[in-house]
Image (cartoon, grey):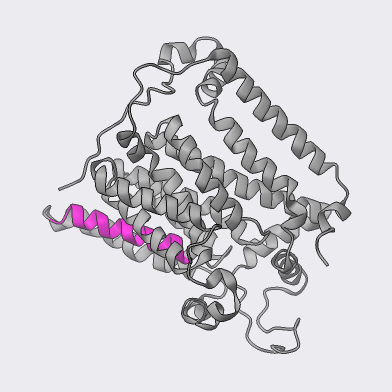
Amino acid sequence: MVEHVEPIVDRVATAPPPAARVHGGWVANVVAWSLGEALLFPVVALYVVSLALSLPRELFSDGWLVILGGHEVVHHGLPVHDTLTIWTHGRDWVDQQWLGQLFFYGLYAAGGIKVALLGHVAAAGSAFTLAIVAARWRGGSMRSVCWLSLPAMFLLMWGSWNVRAQSLAFVLFVGVVWLLMRDARTPSRRVLFVFPLLVLWANVHGTAITGAFLVVLAGVAYAVERRREPLWTWLPRAALLCLGPVACLFASPYALSLPGYYHRMLANPGFRDYVLEWRPTAPDFQTAPFYLLAFLAVWLVGREARRLLRVEKLILAATLLMGLQSLRGVVWFAVAALMLVPVALDAALKPNTAAMRFGLLNRALVVTAVAGTVVALGGVIAKPSSWFERSYP
């Protein structure tokens, strides 16, 4: 039996009727939409501006290495053996994230370290913005999205506070989860777009295995929901969703070397001994928002289970386990929770009986957020390259 969810009307920010949206042209429609989402503009602005102003503290060895990797690809082709270090000189080099490195090196070649760092801001900022848009599309009220965006923003800042190829993976993660959310509600061929996203992701960063695993879970959920129907009506689609992601992971110039690469990256206990972000997520002040969000998500899934589809619950469970397993996995749960949990939170909150619309205040929020972001980004862009490199030894 296929699951269904109950829709929740957003009484905090109800969209104007179609007739009102059409009247006045596209400019009026954009203005009306922005006023209806006024509280979300400062949230996005805070995240983007914080990232931009902190760029000098976001340039670590990973940032320089991703640019160096792109330089090697452009000038010497795809690397096969290490020629850059002494200890591992001549050893096999599986440059799985070559495309992500090429992207950042292209930005560096076009405008120096400043442009490369701004590309990081654009990637992480786009992921956060799209996650909020997806949460609203899913039916979460502006109030719930705002509340959940605060811990999610802190965790995403923490996870994206370093320029590296993974910055590009955030956008791909949001795209994959959004397609799975949409397909769970109204199955269509649109879900096939997850495969080109996974192929791209498989050449950008090793976290592509996370996206592939979520698509496999969606295939399993699809099969379980339709197991009582005739086999031929659901088996081909379920098999494609379960097997296709695995094939996408190996759509790479390093296809034959990737099984060993993923095994070494995922099963090597040495990472936890020497790299902090590979260690389990222990409770402390820094991880408090993660545990707060985790407890809230678990409570809401138990209390308002009917608001979430099976695949959405599986995505939350899988990313939560990843977050508990290692610090580097926290960011995936934060983004998934921001996209999925608001609609369940609405059912637990006391509903509003009247629309909370204050025209002047909404206009002030939108104008201040947009103007502040433009001014802050303009100030950062005007800085010399030395300003961006000042914190790096």
Front residue of this view, candidates 338 and 256: 338
Residue plotted at (34% across, 18% down): 353
Residue plotted at (47% across, 38% down): 147
Residue 163 in the image: state x and y as whole percent: 68, 59
Residue 177 in the image: state x and y as whole percent: 42, 50
Residue situated furthest front in the rendering: 285
Front residue of this view, candidates 285 and 352: 285
Q: Examine the rendered structure and indicate whether residue 183 appears above or below residue 65.
A: above
Front residue of this view, candidates 322 and 266: 322
Query: In the image, 386: left or right of 51?
Result: right
Q: Examine the rendered structure and indicate whether residue 181 appears above or below residue 266.
A: above
Q: Which residues are magenta?
A: 209-227
Residue plotted at (74% across, 72% down): 72
Do we see residue 27 in this rendering? no
Residue 293 in the image: state x and y as whole percent: 43, 50
Residue plotted at (80% across, 52% down): 114
Is 215 covered by the magenta stretch? yes
Is 298 covered by the magenta stretch? no
Query: In the image, 383: left or right of 275?
Result: right
Please tell me whether the stretch drawn in magenta is mainly helix, strand or loop: helix
Front residue of this view, candidates 281 and 52: 281
Do we see residue 56 in this rendering? yes
Q: Examine the rendered structure and indicate whether residue 368 appears above or below residue 101.
A: above
Residue 3 in the image: state x and y as whole percent: 21, 45
Position of the C terminus by quadrant: bottom right
